Image (cartoon, rainbow, N blue to C red):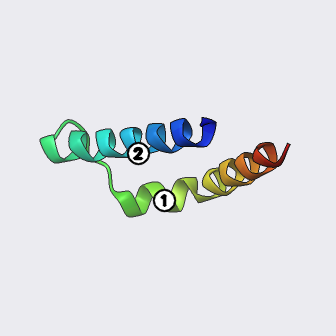
Amino acid sequence: MKSNIVGALVLVVIGTLFLLNNLGFTDMSLGRLLTTWWPAILIAVGLGMLFKRG
């Protein structure tokens, strides 16, 4: 159940970012965002896998 909530929240946040970008409220590039934050994404996935086991 917890993984469903986390996945849903991730999708909501990503969708909100795309919507704000399309409406012109932000000027974000997905490529720039990924190149900046890919280490944090790996850490978050690793922590999720670690806590899912326990």
Q: Is residue 30 left or right of residue 53?
A: left
Q: Amino acid at mark 1?
A: Leu
- Name the residue tied to disc 2: 11
Q: In the depicted view, which residue is nearer to us: 50 or 4? A: 4
Q: In the depicted view, which residue is nearer to us: 36 or 52? A: 52
Among all residues in the image, which is located at the extreme left?
Answer: 23
Packing grade of label 1 (10 A; few <14, some 14-19, many >=20) is: few
For the point 67% across and 53% down, the residue is: 45
Q: Are marks 2 and 1 in contact (CB under 8 Å)?
A: no
Q: In the depicted view, which residue is nearer to us: 8 or 29? A: 8
For the point 53% across and 56% down, the residue is: 36
The spot of residue 6 in percent (x, y) is 55, 39
Q: Is residue 2 left or right of residue 29?
A: right
Q: Amino acid at mark 2?
A: Leu
Packing grade of label 2 (10 A; few <14, some 14-19, many >=20) is: few
Q: Which quadrant of the figure has residue 23?
A: top left
Kindly report which numbered mark, 2 or 1, lies closer to the viewer in this rendering: 2
For the point 59% across and 37% down, the residue is: 1
- Name the residue tied to disc 1: 34
The spot of residue 11 in percent (x, y) is 40, 45
Answer with mark 2 or mark 1, whichever residue precedes in sequence.
2
Q: Secondary structure at mark 1?
A: helix
